[in-house]
Image (tube, rainbow, N blue to C red):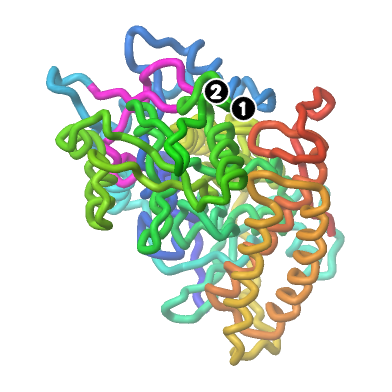
Amino acid sequence: MGRVQTDYLVIGSGVAGMWFALEAAEHGTVALVTKAEFGESNSRYAQGGIAAVWDEDDNFDAHIQDTLMAGAGLCRREAVEVTVREAPSVIHRLIDLGTEFTKKADDTYSLHREGGHSARRILHSDDLTGAEMVRALGEACKGHPRIQVATHQIAVDLITSQWLARQEGEIPEPTNRVLGAYVLDTKEDLVHTYGARAVVLATGGAGKVYVYTTNPDVATGDGMAMAYRAGARVANMEFVQFHPTSLYHPRAKSFLISEALRGDGGLLYDADGHRFMLDYDERAELAPRDVVARAIDAELKRTGRDCAYLDMRHLSGEELSRRFPNIDARLKSLGIDMSKERVPVVPAAHYFCGGVQTDLHGESNVENLFAIGESSCTGLHGANRLASNSLLEACVFATRAAARLAERELPPHRELPEWNPGSAVDSDELVVITQTWEEIRRFMWNYVGIVRTHRRLKRALRRIHLIRDEINRYYWDFRVTADLIELRNLAKVAELVIESALKRRESRGLHYTLDFPERDARWIHDTTLMHRY
């Protein structure tokens, strides 16, 4: 087993993790661990773009108001204002790092408009913005002498001062601070001990807790679950954003049909050719995502059909290929020409608005433990995320976290115990992990999806408690593997979502329950959960 000591341990290699690493490396050493290939993350698959006030006809107040409106009364205004006002500097920094945003013929930047936005303010790199940002940031990280990147390393658990005191038979101090993490090297099958003066969770979301998701396989809520087990407060886990338009096709897995298509005039129809969004909201296809996703869900349940259809036939094949080259090419590879036919779409789990609750610098209630990007709950999104604010949030709060740590006198390293596997042995029943994973995802989709009821939620809670106990027994009996770690984290995230949804006795934003279908002013506060030993 190996030992690593660093000033800053970053877990995750999406936009948030890379951006923080670059900023923090100016003040100390950075160890960045990622459980797959470097850069594999939700960030890489973000198509639409990054929101920022860029055009002279736009303004900060409009972007702030759009964000607050989408957040359905739960946004933290200070977080919204900080994020919006710091957005232009983020864009300039990305450009300086070599990010190539799409330009128009006059050499000005092309700006998309997406649902919930009152102006065109989405900078993009065709329809592969996240991949382009990951490329530029990744190249900068690889060339930095103070950043050490370790791939195929999955964090097992955080090490905190209170946990360490309990292990040593001492009474824990009131203040809990992070000291490092245990990390499994999946190629060497060894658990390494990372000691760090600060730990940054940039592990992304947890879309894989649902059957249908736009997320890649790495999105298993690792940071959220680890932070909760370490004593960090999590908030607003009931608010899961289901993207309205994921491609419905037997050979397509997790393929997103960007919001930008509706921003460029795409219309939604049912199987009978009826444009149904006008029946649900005066903003029609440009309504916020929660409204559009619920409308599609309602139409599918009403008609018994499998999917809705997005119509882009008002644009020529040449225009579609130029504006949305990645989507156009993928659809054509599946035999769909969107200049001639409608695209079959269904909602899919996309983005978590909840996560590790942080302050305006990304710090949790555990000292020196920071969470940035989708693993965090900064207050920016409230009850529903405004399109293309996520990549922006990742950059803004990564900058602010690095700035806070740069001005702080961090504690020295402590001697940490090596990972203790106890009497655990290799498992010969890996089918148990696969079966349990599928069971969680299925009942989460059926009971804790776009539209919920109290009865379904209670049923889901009973089941997840049984599964949690099964996983805990399995976890301590057998040696840890990447699949077991992810299953354990996924089950914890599922439990947090269910418990949060049961606590909120109203419908607001992304949380819609038939038992309490209206908003209730008494619930204008965060739903918080915290593990207590």
Q: Can residue 222 be seen in this view?
A: no
Badge 1 density bin: few <14, some 14–19, many ≥20, Cα 10 Å: many
**Residue displayed at 15% across by 35% down:** 318
Magenta segment includes 119:
yes
Determine the CA span between mark 2 and mark 1. Answer: 6 Å
- Residue 118, quarter of the rendered image: top left
**Residue displayed at 51% across by 31% down:** 276
Q: Residue 71 carries which label?
A: 1
> Residue 440: horizontal and vertical position, in percent?
65, 65
Secondary structure found at label 2: helix
Characterize the magenta stretch by its predominant secondary structure: loop
Q: Which of 314 and 97 is in front in this view?
A: 314
Q: Nearer the viewer, residue 188 or 343?
A: 343
Q: Nearer the viewer, residue 470 or 202?
A: 470
Q: Residue 213 carries which label?
A: none
| Highlighted magenta segment, given as a residue range | 109-132
Badge 2 density bin: few <14, some 14–19, many ≥20, Cα 10 Å: many
Residue assigned mark 2: 67
Secondary structure found at label 1: loop
Q: Are marks 2 and 1 in contact (CB under 8 Å)?
A: yes
Q: Can residue 433 be seen in this view?
A: yes
Q: Which amino acid does label 1 sit on?
A: Gly
Magenta segment includes 367:
no
* Name of the residue lying farthest toward the right: 171
Q: Which amino acid does label 2 sit on?
A: Thr
> Residue 227: horizontal and vertical position, in percent?
66, 54
**Residue displayed at 55% across by 15% down:** 65
Q: From the viewer's perspective, is residue 420 above or below residue 121?
A: below
